[in-house]
Amino acid sequence: MEVLSVNIGTKKQIKWKGKDVFTGIFKKPVDSIYLEKNDVKDDIVCDRKYHGGIDKACYLFSSNHYKYWESLYPNLDFETGFFGENVTINNLNEQQIYIGDIFRLGGATIQVTQPRQPCFKLGVKFGTQKIIKQFINYNSPGVYVKVLETASVSIGDTMELVERMHDSISVIDIWHLLYQDNFDEEKMEAAINNPFLAESCKKSLLKRIKFK
């Protein structure tokens, strides 16, 4: 997998249900980024309840999916970073990446913690909230990672698997547990007990069990 773009965002004010809300989802390509333990250096994180932090320090999204969204929304300008990702990378396949996987990304060492869960800010970016359901149905959410070793990442760097810590729960398995109407109860239990799954994601899964 090769890095095609690295992106950071500035603080931007948007309107949501009549209120002013701030977001860092509007990201632009830069020459390089530096992965720190809690976030990407100089990348704005406005709502730390849902973004940033150890388990979601950096967001990766595959460039392979851009053509699909460009065909669905031809009037939008899909510059890399459009989905709010810090790293746009080719051939990232959520079905073949497992929770806990450790990768070397540029000079950094990262560990996969969960898929991206879309919120209303993605809808604001697209100009319609129907994108949320479309994004869920497309089954290619990208991945959040924690940073085990801090370092810079630049265009042309590669992402290579270093170690597979757990091979029972893929990123797309978690995605299905989060959003499919019917879920595999054994897989749900395995996911909740997975030591490498982000705690915030575990809470989302526990809510699904509670309200089943």
Image (tube, rainbow, N blue to C red):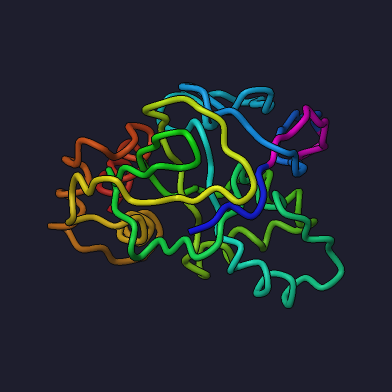
Residue drawn at (60%, 51%), measured in percent from left and top? 156
Q: Nearer the viewer, residue 12 or 127?
A: 12
Q: In the rendered picture of this protein, how many numbered marks are placed on residues?
A: 0
Q: Residue at x 39, y 35 (%)?
A: 109
Name the one closer to the observer, 7 or 129: 7
Residue 187 in magenta stretch: no
Q: Nearer the viewer, residue 133 or 11?
A: 11
Give coordinates of residue 209: x percent, y percent. 25, 48
Would you place residue 123 above or below residue 151 in this image?
Answer: below
Q: Is residue 17 magenta?
A: yes
Residue 181 at what x, y percent from top left? 35, 65
Is 90 placed left or right of 16 in the picture? Answer: left
The magenta segment is: 7-18
The residue located at (68%, 73%) in the rendering is 67
Height in image: 59 above or below 68? above
Query: Going by the image, does 189 lie left or right of 63?
Result: left
Q: Answer above or below: position of 146 versus 112.
A: above
Left or right? Give the position of 168 relative to 106: left
Snapshot quadrant of residue 201: top left
Could you tell me residue 8's position as x and y percent? 70, 35
